[in-house]
Each structure stands twice: as structure tokens, then as C-alpha cells.
Amino acid sequence: MAENTQIFGSSAIAKVEPDRITIRGRDLCEELIGKTSFTYYFLFLLTGREPARELVAMTDACLVAIAEHGFVPSIQAARMTYAAAPDALQGAVSAGLLGCGTVILGASETAGILFADILKRQASDATDIDTAAIAVLREMRTSKQPVPGFGHPVHKDEDPRATRLLKLAGELKVAGRHVEALLAVERNIGSAYGRLLPLNVSAAIPAVLLDAGFPLEALRGVPLVARTGSLVANLLEEKNRPLGFKLAARAEQGVAYDGPALESRVDA
């Protein structure tokens, strides 16, 4: 460090020196590389603590579950961007991630917040989980909010990814209060919203992860990290089996113009 450098803040994540790299108090080369999985390392970076075996296994399963799901908007956006700028892989990956919001991918975060709110309501009202869930759901319907993590355009009856994750949480014995909140929503969403909506993977992921000890504030990072791997795979395929311009052409063909007609003009 230069003599005149003034400290203006601090970070507890990493320190880089000429002969070593310290990550959360551990030597990267001697203690982590070749000795941990990426999922373990991801959790260690997040929390600064050695993650429990169950949390690593549950996070790993969620990353696998959400990484790839066909030609969803993030994949299409990335492939069309890469077709237009094949020299900028990072730009195409970024294009695919920018749409991670409350409807696609980011619903895991909002569903996690919903389950946390239900548990807070249960505690503050000293009531049972179903009563708390019904109260929160009715408030959401009154304000015309959709229920995050419920309903799916393809998996209309059951999302097999959600089913598997919940089963795994039971096998690992990590299913707890957040899974209870999810199941309470599933039981009561029909009466609150007037129609049945099956839970999807974006509801299962936060429930099982929060019960396993994952931080609520970082939930959106799980689909982001997972989908990044799938985007790189799709972009490698795009290089060898191009579809980006075909996707754009199909969109052009499938969207009709209904604006004002071009007025004919008569030269004076």
C-alpha cells in the first residue's frame, strides 16, 4: 500500500498480495482450490462461514434445477445478442441476465420475502400458519398482486422440479418453517384468489434454501449464478448452430403493424 493512501472503507471478503490470496480468512491456493466445490465456495463467499453439508447439497440442487429450462426469454435475448455481436460473449450473457426480475427468475426472491412475511405475521398475531397465510394472501389480492412462485405456463398441474426439491429437503431433514409457509400458501391460494395455482420451482427454491440457512437478501443470486452456466452453454451452441437471427426473424414475421397507414402524397 502506498504511504499516502488513505483508508476509506473495508471489506471482509478478499485480500490480494504478491504471494498469496486470502478469502474470508483462508488461503485460496492452499485451503480452497482443489479442496472445495464451487457451490461450497459460493456459500463461503456469501456468509464467511463454512456452510453445512445440508446447505451445500440443497443449494447445489437448486442451482441444477433452475439453470436450464428451454427457450425462455433470457436464453432468447442472449442468443439474439450474440448473433448481433459474436465478439462480445460477456454482452450476450449480460443480456440474458438483465431480465431477471419479479416475473422470470427473480420470483425466487419475492417468494422468499412472501414466506418470511407470513412467518412474521404468524408470530406477531400469535396465530397458526394457515390463518397468517390467508391474511397475507387476501391483502395481496386486494392490492392486485400476483403470488410469486405459483402458476406456470407449461407445468399447469405440477412442476416436477418443485416436487423434487421439496422431497430432497425432506430427505436432508432441512424442511422447516419456510416450507410450512409455502405449503400454507398452496393450501389456501384457491380460496384467496378464486382459482388453484400450482407451486413452481421459484416457490420451492426459497423455501428449501431459507430453511437450510441461506441468506434471504441473496436469494436472487441463485438463479443468476445458475442461469449464467446455461447461457454460456447456449452461446457455445449458438456459435455452431445459429438460431439468434432466426428467432429475430420469427418475431418480425409474427408481429403485425397496426399503426397509421402511410399517407400517399401528390407532388405539387
Image (spheres, rainbow, N blue to C red):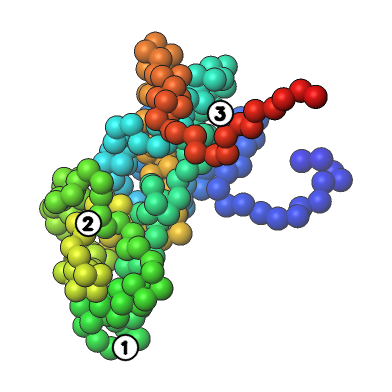
Percent position (x, y) of residue 194?
21, 70
SS label for mark 3: helix
Front-most of residues 19 and 34? 34
* SS at circle 2: loop
- Asked if marks 2 and 3 touch (Cβ < 8 Å), the reply is no
Give the residue at x 42% y 54%.
Answer: 102
The image shows residue 67, relative to residue 173, as above or below, that is: above
CA–CA distance in space, label 2 to label 1: 26 Å
Q: Quadrant of the C terminus?
A: top right
Q: Residues within 10 Å of mark 1 (few under 14, many from 20)?
A: few
Q: What's the distance in space between the residues labelled 2 and 3, CA to CA?
A: 33 Å
**Mark 2 against mark 1, which lies toward the viewer?**
2
Residue 230 seen in the figure: yes
Q: Residue at x 40, y 37 (%)?
A: 73
Q: Is residue 209 visible?
A: no
Quick check: 211 left or right of 4?
left
Badge 3 is on which residue?
Answer: 91
Q: Secondary structure at mark 1?
A: helix
Residue type highlighted by circle 1: Asp
Is 96 placed left or right of 2 in the picture? left
Residue at horizontal 24%, vertical 65%? Answer: 182
Q: Amino acid at mark 3?
A: Gly
Q: Amino acid at mark 2?
A: Leu
| Sequence-first tag of 3 and 1 | 3
* Label drawn at residue 148: none
List the residue tagged with mark 1: 125
**Label whose residue precedes the other's in the sequence (2 or 1):** 1
Closer to the camera: disc 3 or disc 1? Answer: 3
Q: Which residue is mark 2?
A: 199
Q: Position of residue 171 (x, y in %)?
A: 13, 53
How many numbered marks, from 0 up? 3
